[in-house]
Image (cartoon, grey):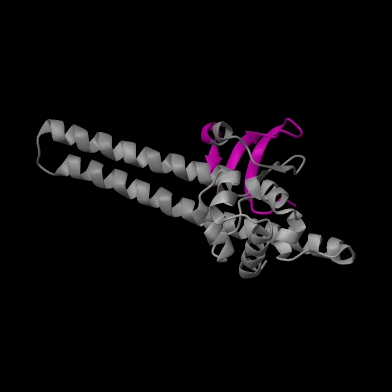
Amino acid sequence: MDQIKIGRFIAKCRKEKGLTQMQLAEALNITDRAVSKWENGKAMPDSSIMLELCSILGITVNDLLNGEVTEMKDYKESYEKNLLDMVRQKEEADKRMLSLEILIGIFSMIILFAFVFTAAFVSMADWLRVVLIVFGFVVGMIGVVFALKIEQEAGYYECAHCHHRYVPTFKSVLWAMHVNRTRYMKCPECGKRSWQKKVISKD
């Protein structure tokens, strides 16, 4: 998808409707800066407001993703292409997020061990030692929670029995036994428990 082309199309449709960036932003309950980023090709509208945006501008989602009004004869072909582009972009974003998860996890553990090591081997008052250890654990645990949240939301888990791929709840991921990103969880499709691997694609 061409973000520059889409941005120009959004600006053109907005002006045709006689709306300012501020008016469009207010209708969508977002900032005018977000609208400006779309129109400059620096960002894409979030999927949660895409339908409402298209309704206000009087276009279809397919038109929006093409950056132009789509003729009916080309509609199916462009729709399938846009769908594949969106799936590909999600997979790439998920891969980046999972890489970030590793960095957050490593960084959190470094902070935790650094504070605990300092408290254990550097001469200081007992109260300061306790503060350092507690602070290290708090920062470490916050990092672990963020990393788990990323792991839960990015990609899918695949059931070893029925091969259903799904996004589990955060609670399921948090309490599941695991080896790296493989977790022992209950499949919402077949109801069986198994060691489920993290995968990127839905199919």
Say whether residue 171 is visible: yes
Above or below for 65 versus 26: below
- Range covered by the magenta-colored residues: 174-203
Q: Residue at x 13, y 44 (%)?
A: 122
Above or below for 104 versus 70: above
**Residue 53 is a magenta residue:** no
Q: Residue at x 65, y 58 (%)?
A: 14
Is 100 placed left or right of 86 in the picture? Answer: left
- In this rendered view, identify the residue nearer to me: 82 or 89: 82
Q: Residue furthest right?
A: 73
- In this rendered view, identify the residue nearer to me: 46 or 133: 46
Say whether residue 84 is visible: no
- Measured from the top left, where is residue 169 in percent x and y? 60, 34
- In this rendered view, identify the residue nearer to me: 27 or 102: 27
Numbered disc total: 0
**Residue 188 is a magenta residue:** yes
Q: Residue furthest front?
A: 18
Q: Residue at x 18, y 40 (%)?
A: 119
- Measured from the top left, where is residue 123 in percent x and y? 9, 41
Above or below for 15 versus 170: below
Q: Residue at x 51, y 42 (%)?
A: 149
* The quarter of the displayed image where residue 75 is located: bottom right
